Image (tube, rainbow, N blue to C red):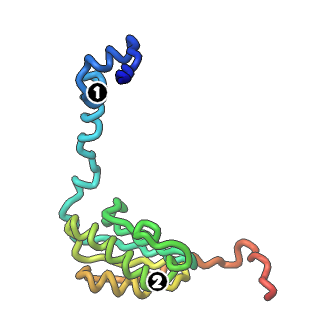
Amino acid sequence: MAEPKKAKSSPKAAKDAAKPKTPAEAPVDAALSLTDEIEKPKIIKAKGSKNVTSGIAHVLASFNNTIVSITDRRGNVLGWSSAGKCGFRGSKKSTAYVAQVIAQDAARQAMSHGLREAEVRLNGPGTGRESAVRALQAMGIEVTLIIDVTPVPHNGCRLRKARRV
């Protein structure tokens, strides 16, 4: 009968066999510093500006995107949202429905700071202007004033060439 062949033993194989199988461990000092950085709480500057009752909702509605930013009276941002932040891409970003979703998201953030009423400043020619204002009202923010702050040139820069279709 043939005897089973024994595997050739090398010095490295002997060392591996002597050690118990455990997951690879980093040096203790390195592991502590990594977990400290991961578990550190974020320092948020906006935490100090709680209980802001009135503010300004800036709605920038361009042809390709809509951005809603809600600030207090001094201009400190309480909450903001955009189509890309809410997960919309491409041509969906310029729709009125997305402007409604964005306004609701920004309103939730601002209401967590205690916002109850806001004046709305509309900027740009986009489709989401009215739906953003309606969404802010539906969320429970009392709209005190609606202003259109879209910049209008008094014959300033020359326009780009007209498209020939």
Task: Tell me the distance, in whole angstroms, between the alpha carbons under discs 1 and 2.
Answer: 54 Å
**Residue 128, image x and y in percent?**
46, 83
Looking at marks 1 and 2 on the same chain, the residue that comes earlier in the sequence is marked by 1
Residue 99's disc is none
Number of other residues with Cα within 10 Å of mark 1, as a class: few under 14, some 14 to 19, many 20 or more: few
Relative to residue 113, is residue 10 depicted above or below?
above
Is residue 21 visible in the rendered image? The answer is yes
Residue at the disc numbered 1? 25
Q: Nearer the viewer, mark 1 or mark 2?
A: 1
C-beta proximity under 8 Å, tags 1 and 2: no
Q: Nearer the viewer, residue 160 or 65?
A: 65
Relative to residue 55, is residue 38 depicted above or below?
above
Q: Which amino acid, by three-letter code, is at mark 1?
A: Glu
Which quadrant of the structure image shows residue 54? Answer: bottom left
Which residue does the image show at 23% across and 23% down from the upper left? 20
Q: Nearer the viewer, residue 161 or 17?
A: 17
